[in-house]
Amino acid sequence: MNAPNVSGMLMLILPEVVLSVGAMITLLLGVSGADAGRSHRAAMAALATAVVGVVLAIGMLTGAPLAPGTTFIANDGFRWTLTALLCAGTGAAVVLTEAYDRRAGVARAETPALLLLAATGMTLLTAARDLMVVFLGIELMSLATYVLVAMHRTSARAAEAAVKYFLLGAFSTAFLLYGIALVYGATGSMQLEGIGSAVASGAKLPGLLMAGVALMLVGLAFKVAAAPFHLWTPDVYDGAPTAVTGFMAASVKAAAFAIFLRITAEAFAPLLADWHPVLWVLAAATMVIGNVLALGQQQIKRVLAYSSIAHAGYLLVAVVSFSAEGATALVFYLVAYTLATMGAFAVLVALSDGTDRPLVRQDLAGLRERHPWLALAFAVCVLSMLGFPLAGGVGFFAKWQVLQAALQASVPQQTLAIVLVLSSVVSGGYYLGLIAPAFMQSPVPAARPIPAPPTGVRAIAIACAVVVLVLGVLPSSLTRLAQRSAPSAFAGGPTVATTIQP
């Protein structure tokens, strides 16, 4: 693959350049001018940067036919579709964090700048075709997110969550980096394509290679919160500021799954028979553990934390399918899940009272009477996570796509599909338990009056719910986009998928 010229390379990383420059400008706006309005100016600059990122990604996706990328950076539909999704999620997170921080009295310019830096790392992950680029993207995303979790410096819960996230995150990164070193030692290459070629031709040090693959899978499993590497998730999601939790549950998870799929498809495809049974067990365990443990939770963010673990299991089913259909299902599911998650967390931000008190199910009581449109938006987004037909909009078709991918694999994964269906049925217990108080109970007087939700927060909640419903009526448009976005490694079909074990 020929190396592109400087201008061509710049075009490939233009979203990352825009996001990182926007982060610097956001910081400058936050320290210049009068004190009043600094954080708002910084948030508006960050929002504009995220919008530009969306426009650039859509332009690359819908413009001229995509030229070949490089051995370092991909230039395919998968990269640009997920870049647009991540930039859109970052823009929504900017609006939600400003509203949440302003209500808590801790609004500052560093928060939107950190969101943009995290987005830079995430978009880099969608494009990475070299293990060093993978490591740089993960570190940039993770370090910015660690700080975002701890931004409310007077909150003991946020500090505890940040320490847990940092320590366990650093531990998982050590696994990943050590695995990268072993894979390089066994294959002599850092590029995903080169690793795949070396493995297919027979690695000189197969024992070293398998140890490296195992360590890398452990590091990636932590990033996507797959069981049994999920234990950090409930505490971190619960202690982090609500808007940051939504950003982590949607965008950070999407970026982690993007690189998970690309590494397994481009680098480790010849080893499918070795790693497939491991991911099969992880997928099944993650679906069961996430849904069962969510049933006993009362705090809303802990419910959604275990819900995000369960969704990681569903997404792992798409990865385990190892086919173009699996890649299509993964992109489709990430879009649907991001919309539903950001919409649900927008409602939680609207209900927050600015204190460190965790929201519980009872805080949703009477939401239909207090804010009928927010109640409706919350119900639609939660039903979409459940995969409920019609009212759940696109969420039903997202799970249907994953099921189809599992059943249409070269060796159909019927058992995994059954686990997915049964665990989704179990999830109805806690999803409907969130909706019921909003529509079937009377409002409970709040200890501290909650101001009217900001316009931006309401707009995000309602817009996400509307798009979820529209895509539920017209899923074919999203299906075509997802099919176009399947990674190039699956363009001709899974050449080694016949080695999958049922």
Image (cartoon, rainbow, N blue to C red):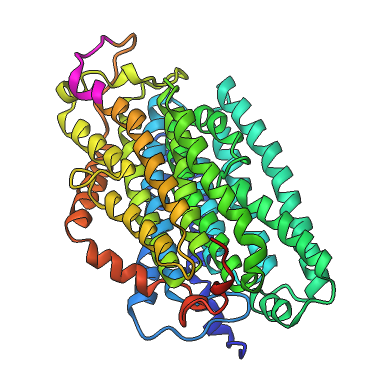
Percent from the top left, x then y, of residue 56? 39, 70
Residue 312: percent from left, percent from top: 49, 47
Q: Is residue 402 left or right of residue 293?
A: left
> Could you tell me which residue is drawn at 37 percent across and 41 percent down?
424
Q: Position of residue 45 (x, y in %)?
A: 40, 52
Residue 417: x %, y % from top left: 42, 52
**Figure quadrant of residue 153:** top right
Residue drawn at 43 percent across, 32 percent down: 242
Q: Is residue 92 above or below residue 151?
A: below
Residue 10 to residue 135: above or below = below
Q: Which residues are magenta?
A: 436-445
Front-most of residues 287 and 257: 287
* Depth check, front residue: 330 or 165: 330
Between 63 and 367, the one lying in front of the other is 367
Horizontal side of 365 relative to 234 (left or right) equals: left
Q: Quadrant of residue 391?
A: top left
Q: Is residue 25 visible?
A: no
Depth check: give the residue in front, 424 or 229. Answer: 424
